[in-house]
Image: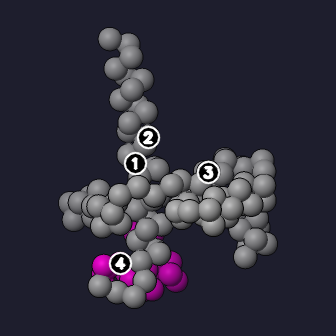
Amino acid sequence: MQTIVRQTAQRDGRAVKIREEQEPGSAGKAVIAARTKLLAGFDYQGVPATGEKTTRWRPLAAQAEAGNVSLLSGPWNAAWLDEICVVPAGRHDDQIDATAGAFDELALRVTSTIRTVQLSGF
C-alpha cells in the first residue's frame, strides 16, 4: 500500500494536494504520522473527520443535485456510481467519504479563504 501511495504522489507531482481522512483514535494518528513521513516533500495532510457522515456528504449532494458536479469519464465510473447511489444503505461508503472530502477541500475551503481575503480589505 505504501508503495502505491508514494508512486501515485510522485506521478501526480508536488503541486497536487494530498488529503486523507484521519480516523478517530490513536490508530488514525499513527497512520497519518507514518504517511506524513512517507510523503515528505509533498503537500500531505491528514484531515480529522468531524460530525456525522451523512452531514459531511450533504454539500456535495446539494451541488450534484443542482447540476454543478461533473464526472470525468473513466473505467472507475461504474463502481463509483454503484456505491454512491446506495449510500447510506450500501455496504461501503469509502468512495463517497473521499469524494465529499475532496469537494470540501477544493470547493468549500478555497471559497472560505477567498472570502476571508476579500473581507480583510474592508
- Mark 3 burial class by Cα count in 10 Å: few <14, some 14-19, many 20+: some
Q: Are marks 4 and 2 in contact (CB under 8 Å)?
A: no
Magenta residue span = 71-88
Kind of residue at badge 4: Ile
Q: Are marks 2 and 1 in contact (CB under 8 Å)?
A: yes
Horizontal placement of 91 versus 65: left or right? Answer: right
Using the image, determine if residue 56 lies above or below residue 106.
below
Q: Which residue is mark 2?
A: 110
What percent of the width, then of the height, locates residue 82?
37, 86
Horizontal placement of 64 versus 118: left or right? Answer: left
Indicate the secondary structure of the residue bearing disc 2.
helix
Q: Does the segment drawn in magenta span residue 80? A: yes
Kind of residue at badge 2: Val
Q: Which residue is mark 3?
A: 45
Q: Nearer the viewer, mark 3 or mark 1?
A: 3
Please say whether residue 93 is visible from this viewpoint.
yes
Q: Earlier in the sequence, mark 4 or mark 1?
A: 4
User: Could you say which disc has been placed on residue 84 in the image?
Assistant: 4
Q: Nearer the viewer, mark 2 or mark 3?
A: 3
What percent of the width, then of the height, locates residue 108?
38, 46
